[in-house]
Amino acid sequence: MKLNNRELSNKIRVYHRYLGFFLAGIMFMYALSGITLTFRDKDYFKKEVVVEKVMEKDLEKPPMIRGAKNIEYNKQTGEIKYIQMQPPKILGMIEKMHKATSSTPLYFLNVFFGIALLFFVFSAYWMFLPQTEIFKKAIYFTLGGILLSLLMILI
């Protein structure tokens, strides 16, 4: 099946449209997790959780646990009890999606999302002829976004 330029352009528009609606749901979740992760050094979205674990017995002092307070360690039993600020279960799971690494199953979603966003970048330009005014403005806005991102990274 051979497509002419107009048919190909229309196909790209259809893919762009429906992929956009699908990605809107994923973007919503990433936006929520991104906003909450921005404030991870604060306790706005967290609650106190009492954590109880069994560790090695007879340690001279309890291990350092990031963010733990009121640590109680029983040398004879190895039981340790402390308070830690943690996000609610659902929010914690959403944040995990944002922080996924290649050793977690969620990395497939992150890679798919990244590739889909790259498709969006290129397909957005496919919708306009290069000689039109809107295409030229789109290039300027894109360069502005790239420059702003680089500036924020470097500062």
Image (cartoon, grey):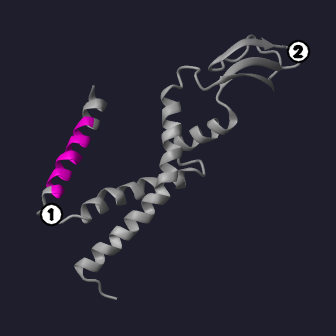
User: Which comes before the other along the chain, label 1 or label 2?
Assistant: 2
Q: In the picture, which quadrant includes the N terminus?
A: bottom left
Magenta segment range?
134-148
Q: Residue at x 59, y 48 (%)?
A: 104
Say few, some or many: other residues with alpha carbon within 10 Å of mark 2 (under 14 / 14 to 19 / 20 or more): few
To which quarter of the image does residue 40 belong? top right
Question: What residue is disc 1 on?
Answer: 130
Q: In the picture, which quadrant includes the C terminus?
A: top left
User: Label 1 to label 2, Cα distance in Å?
Assistant: 75 Å
Residue 64, position as x, y percentages in the image: 66, 17
Secondary structure of the residue carrying numbered label 2: loop
Secondary structure of the residue carrying numbered label 1: loop
Count all numbered tags in the image, as a single digit.
Answer: 2
Q: Is residue 85 left or right of residue 41?
A: right
State whether residue 77 is above or below residue 103. above
Q: In front: mark 1 or mark 2?
A: 1
Q: Is residue 112 left or right of residue 2?
A: right
Q: Given contact means CB atoms under 8 Å apart, are the residues at marks 1 and 2 in contact?
A: no
Residue type marked 1 = Pro
Q: Residue at x 17, y 66 (%)?
A: 129
Residue 105, numbered circle: none
State whether residue 114 is above or below residue 75. below
To which quarter of the image does residue 73 belong? top right
**Residue 55 visible from this viewpoint:** no
State whether residue 144 is above or below residue 125. above
Q: Residue at x 66, y 39 (%)?
A: 90
Residue 88, position as x, y percentages in the image: 67, 32
Question: What residue is disc 2 on?
Answer: 76
Residue 32, position as x, y percentages in the image: 52, 38
Residue 133 shown in magenta = no
Residue type marked 2 = Gln
- Chief secondary structure of the magenta portion: helix
